[in-house]
């Protein structure tokens, strides 16, 4: 009888480790798929990296730099809440006239791009500059409305950090 229990124990241990190995493989596949999605979005939105170049300077589409700016505004309070993500997606769909799946793809790419800099203030400054360089000053009123909408998504009021971003945008438009 004790041999039967030992055999069952060995089978249970083997089943446990096989299950764990499959879970690790599944998780690895998910991470690799996400990386492929970011790479595909980068190609689709015209992003290219060059040696000794800031990531914001590799953006060739004002929608990308604008979306990354919205992500940084949402992250100023420590992370992106569901309300902030929904506000970003809503802004991307309405202002850029994008379907939902394209807005989601742009959001994911913008989130990746926003994370490429260790200094969020510098990245915000560079993204504002890049958005204006690519889209012209006519983009500023839309950007101000978008930043305000995302900044107010959680609490209904604009934080000091969001107000500073809006002020930087207003200085360029005036």
Image: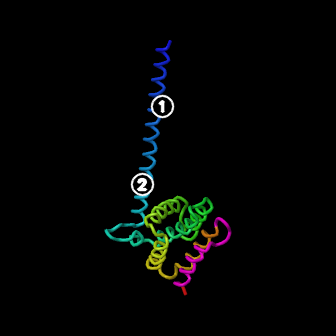
Mark identifier at residue 52: none
Query: Does residue 101 lie above or below 47 as drawn?
Result: above
Is-magenta flag for residue 169? yes
The C terminus sits in image quarter = bottom right
Number of on-image labels: 2
Label 2, secondary structure: give it.
helix
Q: Which residue is mark 2?
A: 35
The x, y position of residue 161, in whole percent, is 58, 73
Dot 2: few (<14), some (14–19), or many (≥20) neighbours within 10 Å?
few
The x, y position of residue 7, in whole percent, is 46, 19
Range drawn in magenta: 153-172
Spatial separation of the CA atoms under disc 1 and disc 2: 29 Å
Left/right of residue 174 with respect to residue 45 in the rendered view: right
The single residue placed furthest to the front in the displayed view is 2
Q: Which residue is mark 1?
A: 16
| Principal secondary structure, stretch drawn in magenta | helix
């Amino acid at each position: 009888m004790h041999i039967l229990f030992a055999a069952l124990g060995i089978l249970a241990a083997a089943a446990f480790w096989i299950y764990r190995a499959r879970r690790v493989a599944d998780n690895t596949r998910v991470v690799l798929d996400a990386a492929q999605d970011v790479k595909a979005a980068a190609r689709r939105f015209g992003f290219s990296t060059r040696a000794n170049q800031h990531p914001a300077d590799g953006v060739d589409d004002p929608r990308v730099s604008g979306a990354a700016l919205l992500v940084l505004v949402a992250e100023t309070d420590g992370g992106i809440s569901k309300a902030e993500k929904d506000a970003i997606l809503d802004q991307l769909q309405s202002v850029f006239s994008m379907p939902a799946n394209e807005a989601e793809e742009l959001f994911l790419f913008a989130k990746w791009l926003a994370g490429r800099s260790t200094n969020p203030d510098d990245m915000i400054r560079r993204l504002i500059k890049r958005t204006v360089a690519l889209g012209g000053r006519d983009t500023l009123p839309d950007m101000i409305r978008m930043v305000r909408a995302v900044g107010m998504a959680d609490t209904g009021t604009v934080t000091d950090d969001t107000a500073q971003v809006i002020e930087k945008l207003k200085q360029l438009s005036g």
